[in-house]
Amino acid sequence: MTGVAVVAAFARWADTVLKGSAVLLFITMVGLVLAQVLARKFFEPLVWSEELARYLFIWVAFLGWIIATQRGSHVAITQFSDSAGPGMRRALRLFGDVATLVLMAWLLRYGLQLVWNNRDVDTVTLYFSYALVYAAVPLAAAAIGGLTLTRVVREWRA
């Protein structure tokens, strides 16, 4: 197996894990909210379910950001770039990608700092470290940075 084939196989595996995790976390979040509503109406409220649903929502949002970046499906205002010539369009894409890389580097740095600073702070009702919640920030920053860098390299070679 060549190096390119190994990287391609890893990319397929990571894509499957990413999308599968997003779907699983979303279904779990919806189930928790539904259970919370039903328990509150007919039984005793589930105190922990609201907190866990909130943390799952954070992770789903960041995983969704990665998936949207991968698909190129973010909302964009393209009126100016659509009317520009091919060279200017390419320069604008490069500018946007560089700005994204700068933002992702910043989020990675401060996201890791957030994780480190909260490693010994427990959540209110679930008693696990807030670092697990905040880990979504550097993970998304690294993934989006990698996807953007790959796109920049691909554009540069073209």
Image (cartoon, rainbow, N blue to C red):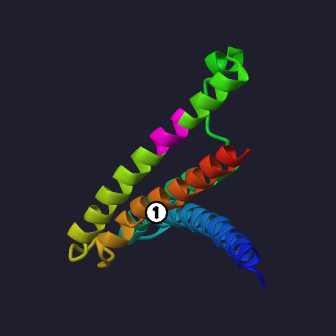
Residue 64 shows in this picture: no
Camera-nearest residue between 156 and 68: 156
Outermost front residue: 157
Element under label 1?
helix
From the viewer's perspective, is residue 138 above or below residue 14?
above
Q: Main secondary structure of the magenta part?
A: helix
- Tell me the quadrant of the picture where the N terminus can be found: bottom right
- Mark 1 highlights which residue? 53
Asked whether, in this view, residue 132 is left or right of residue 65, the answer is left
> Badge 1: few (under 14), some or many (20 or more) residues near its Cα, within 10 Å?
many
- Tell me the quadrant of the picture where the C terminus can be found: top right
From the viewer's perspective, is residue 74 above or below residue 87?
below
Outermost bottom residue: 1
From the viewer's perspective, is residue 2 above or below residue 69?
below
Q: Residue 9's image quarter?
A: bottom right
Residue beneath the point at 25% across and 75% down: 119
From the viewer's perspective, is residue 89 above or below residue 117?
above
Span shown in magenta: 95-100
Looking at the rendered structure, the kind of residue marked 1 is Ala
Residue 113 shows in this picture: yes
Q: Is residue 97 magenta?
A: yes
Residue 120 percent location from the top left of the image:
21, 77
Residue 29 percent location from the top left of the image:
54, 63
Q: How many marks?
A: 1
Camera-nearest residue between 21 and 45: 21
